Amino acid sequence: MAIFGNLVSRSLRIRKKFTLKTGTPRQYQVQVLHRLLEKAKHTQFGEHYDFQGILSNPQWVSQYRKSIPVHNYNKMHDEWWHKCLEGEGNVSWPEKVKYFALSSGTSESASKHIPVTKDMLRSVKKVGVKQLYSMVNFNIPPKSFEKGILMLGGTTSLYEKGDYYEGDMSGIQAKNIPRWFRRFYKPGGNISNKPNWEQRIKLIVRKAPSWDVGTVCGVPAWVQIVFEEVIKYHKVNNIHEIWPNLAIYIHGGVSFEPYRESFQKLLGKPITFIETYMASEGSFGFQARPGTKGIKLVLNAGVFYEFVPFNEENFTADGEVKPNPKSYMIHEVVEDVEYAVMLSTCAGAWRYLIGDVVKFTSVKEHEIIIVGRTKQFLSLCGEHMSIDNMNKAIDTVQKKMGITIKEFTVAGFSYENLFAHRWYIGTDAVDSDVEQIRQIIDETLSEINDDYAVERTSALKEVFVEIIPNQVFIEYLRFKGKEGAMNKFPRVLKGAKLKDWEEYLAHKAINTNV
């Protein structure tokens, strides 16, 4: 095994030395789009929108972007994907879909069924291999490549629904992992196949000392819970007393910054943190350079990107896209502008708004940071507060107050003929000075967001803070049937979801005095 680790490390370095770029970002993306249209031109979708005619146009890229309307999930499902679920083949991609990834994201209550095609599974693997190659850029010891990889995803148990299977994207991936990888994969098929998250946690905790884990992958909140439970159960001081060779944490799904302070306390020595960008719709990129925050988009793996400026010209105040929004290709974007991500993919998604909002930190390196969701910005009166803003405010509170905040959510509402925000903050330091926390949040947001600062002098009259034990957030997810590694607590609550949360808190307060 030690020889294997050195061989992998050496081969990655040799490959890097002899790998040359063969095209510009635009060339890669035009090539991807051409392949997508060629392959899908005889599908129901391709014939409806005349992909053959588009491809024969000298200005075919522009023609594609003019001819195909923008889709969100509901539009794509109602007009096309429902046929896939009913057993039809060749709908928006030339095959009968065998897998559907279930996803509720953080803003929808009902589960979405996202098609996962054979080509998309190949795309995900391709991005994974590219990420492995990029590991040579980080100072990772060769022995790390011979250790176990603990993947804390959703259950790998898939549900058979007649002609197809549905389940978590992580489960679909696990069902299709290469044989050679299974020797490294933890917690293994028997545990990861358990549908109950709590049961999986208990088994992982008890088995932890028998594994030599070098890499952990998963959403920060749930990885942190697993680490805490392992440390508590085995009565050790930190996770490295159980896994001394743990060197890499690959994370994604939400910003890691609110968790960084509390996460560090669980470690016995420094490790390498690497961010990825993956969703039920595909795998899009990863952090490729140490010391940078940006996620490098992979431009030649079956996904064509467009970027829609996230502004009042293209979106409503509720985050709904307006007709015919202006979009830009990868070579047309600029840095520090908020864009909604729009995809055309080898899973049969066409000009599909995934819901994420990003900024480019480096156009040259096509690197992005995720700053929010189209429906999880707060802009009641023009304050345009992003999840990125909220994360920075919480991070500042943790540092200045010396407390750990594991979860939080924010709501906006009408207040005395104007508007207000209410922050629900999850921490076990329930006796913290609420007024000081409120002041730090308010001051931080005013410093980093000019729109917020302006509105605080006019329409945004007040900011409220409620301190809640962190366990309440977890219990609420459990109550909603959303406990587990792939579920995330929404950073912004609106409408029915806000009402449901408030009713839950009120009921809990009456029954438990919490």
Image (tube, rainbow, N blue to C red):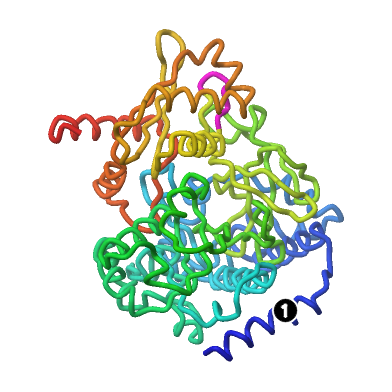
Dividing the image into 4 quarters, which one contains the C terminus?
top left
Residue 255 drawn at (x, y percent): 52, 48
Query: In which quadrant of the rendered view does residue 420 lie?
Result: top left
Q: Is residue 375 visible?
A: no
Q: Residue at x 79, y 77 (%)?
A: 17
What residue appears at the point 41 percent right and 72 percent down from the top-left corner? 243
Q: Residue at x 58, y 85 (%)?
A: 5
* Up/down of 122 relative to 11, above or below: above
**103 drawn magenta:** no
Relative to residue 40, is residue 99 drawn left or right? Answer: left
Question: Most extreme residue toward the left, as rendered?
Answer: 511
Q: Which residues are magenta?
A: 380-385
Q: Residue at x 43, y 49 (%)?
A: 262
Amino acid at circle 1 = Arg
Measured as percent of width and height from the top left, residue 301 is found at: 67, 67
Q: Main secondary structure of the magenta part?
A: loop
Percent of width and height locating residue 149 = 46, 74
The answer to whether residue 383 is magenta is yes
Return the residue found at the far top.
Answer: 417
Q: Compared to 427, does 295 lie above or below?
A: below
Few, some or many residues within 10 Å of mark 1 (<14, 14–19, 20+):
some
Q: Nearer the viewer, residue 227 or 191?
A: 227
Quick one: 372 or 82, which is closer to the camera? 372
Place of residue 501 in the rendered image (x, y in percent of width and height, measured from the top left): 30, 34
Q: Residue furthest right?
A: 58
Taking 102 as reference, is 513 left or right?
left
Foreground residue among 141 and 306: 141
Which element is circle 1 on? helix
Would you name the residue on which mark 1 appears?
Answer: 13
Residue 46 in view (yes/no): yes
Along the line of sight, which residue is nearer the eye, 495 or 92? 495
